Image: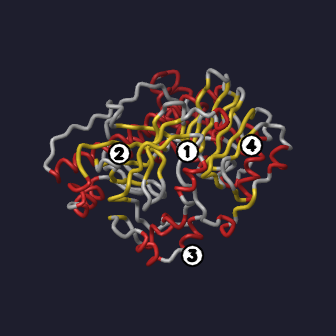
Amino acid sequence: MDLKKFGFVDIDHELFSKTGTPYKVYAELLEGEAQKQFYNVLNQPYVTYGALMPDAHTGYTMPIGGVCATKDMVVPQFVGFDIGCGMCAYKTEYTRAQVETHVDQIYDLIVERVPLGFNRHKNHQSLKIDLPMSDFAEHILNTIGLKQVGTLGGGNHFIEIGYGADERVWIVIHSGSRGFGHKIASHYMLQSYIAKYPQEGRLKAVIDDFEERNRLFKERNPEGYKKALKKFSSKQKLDISKKYDLDKIKEILPLGVESDMGRDYIKDQNFALEYALENRKRMIETIHNILNEVLDGEFVFDYTDENHFINRNHNHAEYNTKRKEWIHRKGATQAENGMRGVIPGNMRDGSFVVIGRGADESLSSSSHGAGRVMSRKKATKEVNLEEFKASMDGIKGTVDANTIDESPFAYKDIFEVMRLQEDLVDVVEHIKVLINIKDSVKRRY
């Protein structure tokens, strides 16, 4: 694939070297904007190392496909909006031949039973995660989060059923923490901005007014007042966030890991990581039950079996005890030595099960996919629908005008991306596609 025709250019190592921060780039070409973003990341005083994976492309303040190490700081923008977005893959007992004869029925049942896009469950779903979270995160969980457990979302999130070299069928899911994680990420990005520019926020004044108006309530019913204040404060934070367009805030805004806000972010991020995992597990279980129903099987979904179940997210910040630093991965798959992971390609070319090699130069990371070459808006204008349909021949997929921005033509060549990271992971399975499901609601740009 000739990336230069999509606006990708040679790597400006001279620019990156000016920062004095060591780095490694596994991509052969990058967009100019992505290079500016990576330069800004490397130029932060608390960033000690940076790397770009072969699927890297322009993101929000930091390129997607970016990894960096930080000292004493955690940066919500370096994790991104979809905290815990990642991949799960489950190897079933079924065969390619069994599924191929029922692809239409299986596809229809999945679309019927797994909420896609902005759809959610009508009722709260059960959820047990034994981790602490802030009052704000608890408010978001109880208002929208519990209705979104077991839902796919839109964009590049997908449900895939495919098969490996032994013809055994895999269920593969790409999804994240849904609106729950997005609200948490947005909240901390915004609060760090307001903390730096207090005149931009009015939260303290609003809270002070609430306290003044409810002095008698506080005296007569302290517990009731505490609950009311907690609910009021969370709602006000949400209302404030709606007034800002975070895309217009280009400044990188770190949080000290020992600050109250930094500790709260880490706590809420960790909860969102578990939420995202539970979200993917619920969908796999639903799909596994559909396979049992259609194929007259009685197999039990067992996510505790490491030979069958793989989970690896690609949006997170974690503390590395060896480096004594925080490793941020934004669209990058953790690839410690011996660690199993899943790297998707596109709707047509399937996914790869990999084993990490623990490469120091990539901070034990690999790509999280193929990486976009076209923006969604550009893809809808330039990709031909008939060519998209022809490229998906033999696959039961969500192929229409509303998913054209997710066509294989909008992405880099996944086989070339895998070649560029042979030092980072070993491929142990290529899962070829039988069914690929995406949300098909018309996109708004």
Label 2 sits on what residue type? Gly
Q: CA distance from mark 1 to mark 3?
A: 37 Å
Q: CA distance from mark 4 to mark 1?
A: 28 Å
Sooner in the amino-acid sequence: mark 1 or mark 2: 2
Label 4 sits on what residue type? Val
Sooner in the amino-acid sequence: mark 2 or mark 3: 2
Q: Is residue 259 above or below residue 174?
A: above
Residue 28 image offset from top left, x and y in percent: 68, 54
Q: CA distance from mark 2 to mark 3?
A: 34 Å
Tell me the quadrant of the picture where the C terminus can be found. Answer: bottom right
Q: CA distance from mark 1 to mark 2?
A: 24 Å
Q: Which mark is residue 76?
A: none
Assign a secondary structure to mark 1. Answer: helix
**Residue at label 4?**
41
Verify CB contact (< 8 Å) between mark 2 and mark 3: no
Looking at the rendered image, the disc whose residue lies closer to the viewer, 1 or 2, is 2
Label 1 sits on what residue type? Leu
**Residue at label 2?**
150
Verify CB contact (< 8 Å) between mark 4 and mark 2: no
Q: Residues within 10 Å of mark 1 (few under 14, many from 20)?
A: some
